[in-house]
């Protein structure tokens, strides 16, 4: 039996665990503070409504452009994105790169840590 195949499989599994564990990082309390950058346009919680941006309750797993009663840009409506944690992390870091010509006027968070913390907070909002 070729020992290289099981060894390669072992390392690919390890790499998969490292990549998937990134999705569960972040500090909820720190993320709530990071969310203060978002409150001018987005609301969360039981009484959240759409303002300059859509409410963000339940955003993880939601298709982009799908909140009713919000006028999304054509770019966002046609993006075909489902907001996974990874896609949302990329978007909050570089919105214009992930969805070019979207109407969100935010240049992105400064660090991966801020993004991880924000995602941890948003994960709590079902």
Image (tube, rainbow, N blue to C red):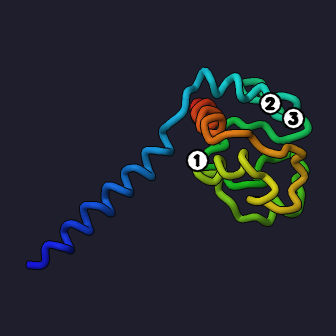
Q: Nearer the viewer, mark 1 or mark 2?
A: 2
Answer left or right for 14 relative to 70.
Answer: left
Q: Nearer the viewer, mark 2 or mark 3?
A: 2
- Which residue is label 2 attached to? 37
Which secondary structure lies at badge 1?
helix
Q: Is residue 122 visible to the viewer in this orientation of the structure?
A: no
Quadrant containing the C terminus in the rendered view: top right
Residue at the image position 82 percent from the left and 41 percent from the top: 54
Which secondary structure lies at badge 3?
loop
Quarter residue 47 falls in: top right
Q: Report the Cα–Cα distance between label 2 and label 3.
A: 9 Å
Instruction: Tell me where residue 39 appears, x and y as whole percent.
Output: 82, 28
Answer few, some or many: residues within 10 Å of disc 1's Cα (few below 14, many 20 plus, some between 14 and 19): many
Quadrant containing the N terminus in the rendered view: bottom left
Residue 41: give its label. 3
Q: Farthest bottom residue?
A: 1
Q: Report the Cα–Cα distance between label 1 and label 2.
A: 19 Å
Residue at the image position 54 percent from the left and 33 percent from the top: 26
């Amino acid at each position: 039996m070729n020992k290289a195949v099981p060894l390669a499989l072992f390392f690919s599994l390890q790499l998969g665990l490292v990549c998937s564990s990134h999705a569960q990082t972040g500090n909820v309390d720190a993320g709530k503070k990071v969310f203060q950058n978002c409150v001018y346009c987005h609301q969360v919680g039981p009484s959240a409504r759409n303002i300059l941006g859509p409410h963000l309750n339940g955003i993880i797993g939601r298709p982009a452009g799908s909140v009713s009663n919000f006028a999304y840009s054509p770019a966002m409506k046609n993006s075909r994105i489902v907001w996974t944690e990874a896609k949302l992390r990329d978007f909050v870091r570089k919105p214009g790169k992930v969805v070019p010509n979207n109407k969100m006027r935010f240049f992105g968070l400064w660090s991966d840590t801020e993004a991880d913390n924000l995602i941890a907070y948003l994960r709590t909002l079902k």
